[in-house]
Amino acid sequence: MSQLYLNEKASRARLKEATAAREDRRDIVKALSWGQVSRRELLKLGLFTGAGLLAPIRGLNPFVPSAYGSDDLGIPSSPLFGVQPFTQPMLRFDLLPRAPMSPTTLNPAPTKEANTAPQLLDPDLVGGAHNQYGPIEGRPPGPDWAHQDFERLSPRIAVEVGQEGARINATYDPGCDAAHNSGVSAGTPCPPCFHPQMPVQNTTRLWTFNGSIPPKLMLGRYGEPILFRHHNRLPFKLTSNGGFGRHTLSTHEHNGHHGAENDGFTGAFFFPGQFYDYHYPIVLAGYTSLNTSAADPFASGPDDDDDVINVPGDWHETMSTHWFHDHMFSFTSQNVYKGNAGMFNIYSGLDRGAEDIHDEYQENGVSRTINLRLPSGRASSTGRAWGNLQYDVNLMLADKAWDRDGQLDFDIFDFDGFIGDAMTVNLCYKPFFEVEPRKYRFRILNASVSRFFKLALSDGSPMIQIGNDGNLLPAPVVLTELDEQGIAERYDIVIDFSRYTLGSKVWLVNLAEHDDGKAPKRDLSLAEALSGRSDDPCVGRFLEFRVNRPLSAPDQSQVPAQLIPNPDLSSIPVVRERVFEFGRGGKNTTFDPDTSFDGPWGVKTDGGVMLNADYGRISAAPRMGTREIWTLVNGGGGWDHPIHIHFEEGQILERDGSAANVSPAERGRKDVYRLRPGGTVKITMQFRDFAGTYMEHCHNTVHEDNAMLLRWDIDPRDGTGVLRRLRTPIPRPQGVDFVDADDILPTAEKL
Ligand SMILES: [Cu+2]
C-alpha cells in the first residue's frame, strides 16, 4: 500500500520534490491564516479543485503519486533527531492554580455584563491606527451575554490563565508527588519541546495555556462555581503566527452545562490584549426544576472534610471528565493543534477523587453509599478529601507533525482532515509512565485534528471502561479493545496493574490505521498493530507502562457494578424531532463576510439544503424546558463524522435504526456521536436551565472549519413564551457590534 508520509527509504529526488511541495502548501496555509486569500480565491487560482482537493500540480497534492514512480505519496516524515520511543517520562498535566474568590482576587473584579472599560489598542491590532480604544473584556456586551444566574451561582474560585507563545514552565505542578509522576517532581523546569532531545518550540509555533507544557488541568467540584478569566496574550500582529493559527480565541468548556455566554460560541471571540470572563457554575442539569431543595445527598459535591454538600438538580446528570479548547470560527483545527487544549476534572459526591472515603449511611433502614471509590488516591495520606490524582491520570492523545527543524507544523492536503505522523501523549513523544501494581483510572482524551484511535493493551488483557465523554457509564464495561475513539471523545478506563509482576512492562497500543483524514482506513488486529508493518507511524505502541513502583499502600479503590444510571426520561414528552444530515456539497447562501464560510462541508436540517456554516443563521430553536429527539445522519462518501452537540448531554436511542446496535460502552450520556461511514445515530436531549446561542458541528475540526457547523438557539426564558430572536455578535477590537440573524430557517420557527 501507499503511505502519506514518506519514510527514510524514499529517494533523494522524491524527498526533494515532496519538500518543495510541502513548502508550497505551507505558503497556502500561511496565506489563508493571514486572511490574504480565501478558499474561493484558491479555487479560482486553480490550486484547489471544486471537490476541495489540492490540484494535482507540481506535487502539491500529496495523494497524487509522484513522477518518480514511487508507490509512496508525498509528505516528508517528521524528523525524530535520533530519539527512540519510551525514553522520556510522560509529564502529567500541570494543575491550574485555584484562588478562592474575594473582592480583590481578580483585578478588575468580574461583572455580570461584560466589562467594557476602554483601553488603548495596540496599532498592530488595528492596521497601524493610533489612538484607537476598545473594551478590556471581549465578551459581547449587554444583557444578552450577561452571566445567567450570576448572583445565585456567584463564583467562589478564580482560575486565571493566559494564552501565550511557548516558554519554559517554571511552576510545574502535577498535583502529586514525584513517585506518581515517573520521578518528575513539582517545580521541575519543563522546556516547550516534545522530547528533551528534540528542539525547543518557537514562541510562534506552540500557543498554549500559560505558554507552557505539559497541558493544563483544572479541578472543580459541584456546588463551587468557577470564574475562568482567560487573557489573550497572543501577538497583536495577525501575521506573527508561525504560518498557522489565528490570534483571536473563543474558549469552549466541552461540554459544560453553562449559559451560552460561557460556551465559547464560535462567533464570540476575543482579541490579543483582552480577557474574557467565563462563568462555569458547575451545576447538575435540571437544577432549576428537579431536586430544587437539594435534599438528595447523591446530588452533591465533596466538601473539605470527607463529607458532601448537597446541590440541586438530577444526580443522574453528574459529570466527571471535560476538556476545554479553542472554538475560533474556521480556525479551530489550527488553534487546538497549536496547543489550545486543557482538561477539566469535575468532582462530585459520587466521583470524589478519594478512594478511601467510606460513606455508608442508613436511610429508611436501607444502607446507601455515595462515594463510588474509583481509583484516585487516599485522603488519609494526602489530607485531601477530593481530587486526589496519584492513581487518576489524564492522558491527552494527539498526532503531530513537525518540519525539518523540529518545529510544529500544520499541513493542508485536502478538506478531509489533517493527520500527523508523530504520536504524543500529554505533548510528549511516545513516553513511559511508571505505575504501582494496582488499579489506575485513565481519563483518555482524543485531542487530534482528524485522527481516530482504537486502544488496546499490548498483552491483550482487559480494561474496564467506566466513562464515555463527560459521564460515568451506568455500569462498567470490560473490553480487550476499546471502541474507536473519535476526536474530542473521552474514554475513562481502569487498568488493573496488580496482575503484573514488579519490573514488567505493558504498552498502550493504537489499532486504528489511517492513510488520510476521512476515517480510519481499518482497525488492525493487535498482532498486526504490534508487528511494526503498518505504514502509519501512529499505529502500534505509543505509551509504555513500567510496573516498577512498589505498592505504597493497599489499593482501596473499587469499580462498583453500578456507576451512574441514566436519567429516566419516560415521563418527559418529546415535543419535536429533527434530522441533521452531515455531508459534502455544502453551499453558502448568505455570503456574510463576517459570519459565513465557504467549504465543501455542510449540514442539512430537516431535509433542507446542505448549508455551509454561518453563525448568523439560526437552524433550530428548541423551547426552554423541553425534550426533543434528534437524528444525526452521515451523508455518505466514506467519511466518519464525530458530531458534537453543545450544552446538554444526550442519550443514544438507536444506531442505524436499532437500539441493539448501541454498544454497552456508549449507553451512558454523551456529547460526541460518531456516525461511522453511512451511519445514523438517534439521540434524545433536553434543553434546560440556561438560554442562548449554541452550536453543533463535526469534531473532525478540518470539517468543522470548512464549514460543517450550525447554530441553534434556546428560546430565551423571558416568561412571555414568545420567541425572541437573539442577535449575532460581530467582534472587533474596538468593541462588539450586534446584527440581526442573516437567516432563520423555517426549522427554527416556533411550533
Ligand atoms: Cu466530519
Image (cartoon, grey):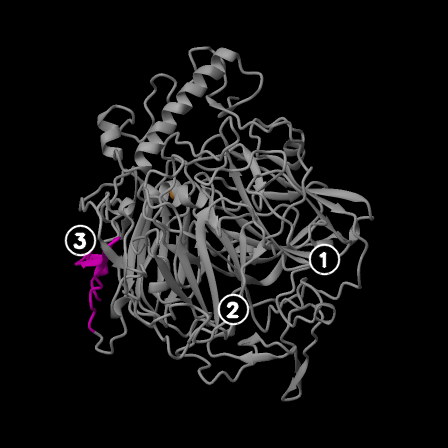
Mark 2 vs ligand 1: CB below 8 Å? no
Residues 26 and 505: in front is 26
Q: State ligand 1's quadrant.
A: top left
Q: Earlier in the sequence, mark 1 or mark 2?
A: 2
- Kindly identify the amino acid type of the residue bearing the numbered disc 2: Ala
Gap in Å between the C-alphas at discs 1 and 2? 32 Å
Neighbor class of circle 2 (other Cα within 10 Å; few <14, some 14-19, many 20+) is some
Is 613 on the left or on the right of 331, as rendered? left
Quadrant housing the C terminus? bottom left
Q: Nearer the viewer, mark 1 or mark 2?
A: 2
Q: Secondary structure at mark 2?
A: strand
* Region rendered in magenta: 722-751
Gap in Å between the C-alphas at discs 1 and 3? 53 Å
One can see residue 679 in this view: no
Q: Secondary structure at mark 1?
A: strand
One can see residue 607 in this view: yes
Quarter of the image where one finds residue 631: bottom left
Which residue is disc 1 drawn over?
439
Gap in Å between the C-alphas at discs 2 and 3? 42 Å
Image position, residue 46 (x, y; %):
25, 23
Neighbor class of circle 3 (other Cα within 10 Å; few <14, some 14-19, many 20+) is some
Find out whether residue 742 is within the magenta segment: yes
Is the residue under label 2 in contact with that under label 1 (CB below 8 Å)?
Answer: no
- Kindly identify the amino acid type of the residue bearing the numbered disc 1: Lys
Residues 368 and 508: in front is 508
Is 174 on the left or on the right of 248, as rendered? right
Which residue is disc 3 drawn over?
742
Check residue 99 in the rendering and tell me which mark sits there, or answer none.
2
- Kindly identify the amino acid type of the residue bearing the numbered disc 3: Asp
Mark 1 vs ligand 1: CB below 8 Å? no
Whether 25 is drawn above or below 322: the answer is above
Residues 383 and 1: in front is 383
